[in-house]
């Protein structure tokens, strides 16, 4: 693990605490619950809140830690090394940005976020709208000065049942032209009871091949009421809220990808030392040794790029091209490395007895969410070719 100029003593302490928590608390749960598609226990979430990981971006004036993207990603890598779903849970407590909240919303929500009592889910994608965020059809209709009514379908809403609120993106006015499709979309905080879906909302879990530990839902809103006081930011500007923080989200996905790859590498090293074939450990065979060396090199290259991007984000510099690069590079790397680790395990790797199959399944998802690899290549090429 590199300890160069990116990693100050404070960051090393944060990283060490996250690593200990991941290996001692998260990994045993992942090994027990993931094969049976079990749900992570509430006690784990409460322990994460006690570590101060929810609302970690919040300034100290709101009771937060005032940390940055690099600390966020250090923690995410460690948690993903154990179970990517738990690393993803970090985002559920860091989704409300104080700068877009009203004073009343800050006072009402932020203290509960910090305690882990107000974690969110995001309802953005729809059956006909994935990477094309402007193609939303879910509608919000103003029914009084105080209330809106939501109607429409949403897809890929992870943690919809366990969350305390869902941020729903809906169209509040039609676009004035095809070029202005992104306008007229608004974002609403739909508060709900934990363990249930909102009133006037039906749903069903989506049968996933991975990303276990929590459920991902398809939702149908049918006259779901939400107070006007729960509108996030300006009406019609929800698209900008959806894209706000994408650089951090993509760095977070890179961190998750790196954690998965590292977990598979560490497991592969241990397995290669123990597995004996033809009278010697397979770690003695040159092909195995060289494969492990290549895997480690790919992981470190992705990590150093992630540190650079995080530093750019924390300095306030625009780096959407670089964020797309690290998301693309790390997610593609993660699928390759976890696949190589599974190959080293041989037949054992294709069973749920070994965690490497979990890393492999979850790594495949990193190439899809937060913008597919193809979307990242489009963003990067647009920057390269503009002007």
Image: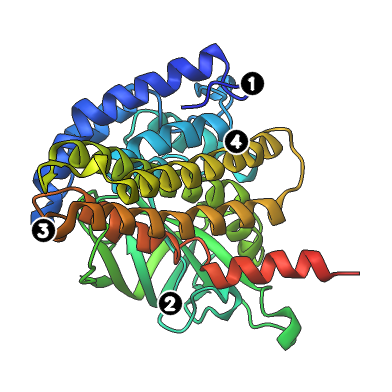
Task: Bin the neighbour count of mark 3 within 10 Å (Cα to Cα): few under 14, some 14-19, many 20 and up.
Answer: some
Check disc 2 and report the residue beneath it. Answer: 126
Mark 2 residue element: loop
Query: CB of mark 3 within 8 Å of CB of mark 4?
Result: no
- Residue in the foreground of this view, choosing between 60 and 325: 325
Rendered view: 67 above or below 164: above
Q: Residue at x 22, y 67 (%)?
A: 209
- Residue in the foreground of this view, choosing between 196 and 364: 364
Task: Measuring from the top left, give residue 361's x and y in whole percent.
Answer: 28, 61
Query: CB of mark 2 within 8 Å of CB of mark 1?
Result: no
Left or right of 181? Residue 350 is left
C-alpha span from label 3 to label 4:
34 Å
- Residue in the foreground of this view, choosing between 302 and 59: 302
| Of pointers 2 and 1, the one earlier in the residue sequence | 1
Check disc 1 and report the residue beneath it. Answer: 5
Mark 3 residue element: loop
Mark 4 residue element: helix
C-alpha span from label 1 to label 3:
40 Å
Check disc 3 and report the residue beneath it. Answer: 351
Task: Bin the neighbour count of mark 2 within 10 Å (Cα to Cα): few under 14, some 14-19, many 20 and up.
Answer: many
Q: Nearer the viewer, mark 4 or mark 2?
A: 4
Left or right of 41? Residue 226 is right
Task: Bin the neighbour count of mark 4 within 10 Å (Cα to Cα): few under 14, some 14-19, many 20 and up.
Answer: many
Check disc 4 and report the residue beneath it. Answer: 307
The colour mode here is rainbow
- Residue in the foreground of this view, choosing between 140 and 96: 96
């Amino acid at each position: 693990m590199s300890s160069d100029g990116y990693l100050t003593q404070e960051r090393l302490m944060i990283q060490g605490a996250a690593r200990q928590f991941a290996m001692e608390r998260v990994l045993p749960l992942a090994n027990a619950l993931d094969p049976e598609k079990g749900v992570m226990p509430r006690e784990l979430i409460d322990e994460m809140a006690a570590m101060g990981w929810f609302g970690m971006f919040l300034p100290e004036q709101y009771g937060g830690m005032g940390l940055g993207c690099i600390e966020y990603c250090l923690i995410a890598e460690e948690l993903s090394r154990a179970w990517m779903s738990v690393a993803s849970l970090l985002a559920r407590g860091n989704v409300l940005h104080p700068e877009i909240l009203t004073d009343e919303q800050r006072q009402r929500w932020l203290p509960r976020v910090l305690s882990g009592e107000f974690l969110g889910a995001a309802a953005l994608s729809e059956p006909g709208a994935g990477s094309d965020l402007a193609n939303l059809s879910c509608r919000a209709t103003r029914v009084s000065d105080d209330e809106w009514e939501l109607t429409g379908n949403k897809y890929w809403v992870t943690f919809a049942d366990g969350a305390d609120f869902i941020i729903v993106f809906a169209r509040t006015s039609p676009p004035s032209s095809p070029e202005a499709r992104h306008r007229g979309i608004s974002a609403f905080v739909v508060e709900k009871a934990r363990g249930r879906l909102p009133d006037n909302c039906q749903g069903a879990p989506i049968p996933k091949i991975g990303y276990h530990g929590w459920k991902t839902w398809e939702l149908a809103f049918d006259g779901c009421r939400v107070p006007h006081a729960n509108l996030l930011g300006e009406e019609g500007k929800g698209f900008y809220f959806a894209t706000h923080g994408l650089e951090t989200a993509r760095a977070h996905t890179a961190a998750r990808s790196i954690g998965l790859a590292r977990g598979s590498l560490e497991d592969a090293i241990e397995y290669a030392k123990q597995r004996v074939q033809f009278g010697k450990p397979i770690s003695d065979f040159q092909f195995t040794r060289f494969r492990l060396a290549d895997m480690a090199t790919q992981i470190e290259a992705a990590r150093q790029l992630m540190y650079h991007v995080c530093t750019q984000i924390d300095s306030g510099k625009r780096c959407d091209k670089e964020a797309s690069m690290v998301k693309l590079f790390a997610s593609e790397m993660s699928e390759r490395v976890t696949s190589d680790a599974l190959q080293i395990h041989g037949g054992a790797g294709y069973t749920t007895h070994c965690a490497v199959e979990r890393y492999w399944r979850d790594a495949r998802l990193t190439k899809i969410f937060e913008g597919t690899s193809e979307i990242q290549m489009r963003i990067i090429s647009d920057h390269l070719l503009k002007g």
